[in-house]
């Protein structure tokens, strides 16, 4: 079942890269007591994710935070090393929190998994965005067609 507005996020553990190496963060660590914009992508370094989805969040970083958001986070079914390299490559270090959901536990528990086996990518995340307030989803946007039409930063700014 897909997560919905009003639902509490499922418990999961993410990995993220820091200057000291990999670090585990739980759902509670990231979302408890905070307003967080979370967007999910099928994969770091993939063309649409790198060229269309993530850049909007970097370009609108200040405006999103000025709307009362504490953290902007991106999640992908990639390992922490790939997510760390992507953060460095995109210039998003210190602006976005890059969350590795390496085994897809979070996206599966939230019902946001996508089978991309036809592209030799296995199970990944659907493209989505959400606003989460103290661990509860207050807005949810799941792409229904290819590209970034419903889950981009412009949509989130309208919802804040």
Image: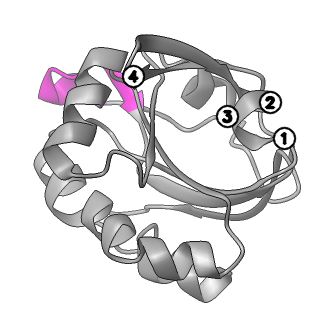
**Front-most of residues 108 and 13:** 13
In space, the residues marked 2 and 1 are separated at their CA atoms by 5 Å
Judge from the rendering whether residue 90 lies leftward or rightward of residue 18; answer left or right.
Answer: left
Question: Circle 3 sits in a helix, a strand or a loop, which is it?
Answer: loop
Q: Is there CB contact under 8 Å for labels 4 and 2?
A: no
Residue at 56% from the left image edge and 30% from the top image edge: 107
**Is 105 drawn above or below residue 145 in the view shown?**
above
| Category of crowding for the residue at label 2, using alpha-carbon neighbours closer than 10 angstroms: few (below 14), some (14–19), many (at least 20) | some
> Can residue 146 be seen?
no
Residue 98, given in percent of the width and then of the height, sits at 42, 37
**Front-most of residues 157 and 43:** 157
In space, the residues marked 2 and 3 are separated at their CA atoms by 15 Å
Task: Farthest residue to the bottom: give it.
Answer: 158
Question: Circle 2 sits in a helix, a strand or a loop, which is it?
Answer: helix
Q: Is there CB contact under 8 Å for labels 1 and 3?
A: no
| Category of crowding for the residue at label 4, using alpha-carbon neighbours closer than 10 angstroms: few (below 14), some (14–19), many (at least 20) | many
Dot 4 corresponds to which residue?
17
Judge from the rendering whether residue 15 lies leftward or rightward of residue 133; answer left or right.
Answer: left
Dot 3 corresponds to which residue?
110
Q: Which residues are magenta?
A: 116-124
In space, the residues marked 3 and 4 are separated at their CA atoms by 23 Å
Q: Going from the N terminus, do you reach mark 3 or mark 4 first?
A: 4
Dot 1 corresponds to which residue?
32
Judge from the rendering whether residue 22 lies leftward or rightward of residue 32; answer left or right.
Answer: left
């Amino acid at each position: 079942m897909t997560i919905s507005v009003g639902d509490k996020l499922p418990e999961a553990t993410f990995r993220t890269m820091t200057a000291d190496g990999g670090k585990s963060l739980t759902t509670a660590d990231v979302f408890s007591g905070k307003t967080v914009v979370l967007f999910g992508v099928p994969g770091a370094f993939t063309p649409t994710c790198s060229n269309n989805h993530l850049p909007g969040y970097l370009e609108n970083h200040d405006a999103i935070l000025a709307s009362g958001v504490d953290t902007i986070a991106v999640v992908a079914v990639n390992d922490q090393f790939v997510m760390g390299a992507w953060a460095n490559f995109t210039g998003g270090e210190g602006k976005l929190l890059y969350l590795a959901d390496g085994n897809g536990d979070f996206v599966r528990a939230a019902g946001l998994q996508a089978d991309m086996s036809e592209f030799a990518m296995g199970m990944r995340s659907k493209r989505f965005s959400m606003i989460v307030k103290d661990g509860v989803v207050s807005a949810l946007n799941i792409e229904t067609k290819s590209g970034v039409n419903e889950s981009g930063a412009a949509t989130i700014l309208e919802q804040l």
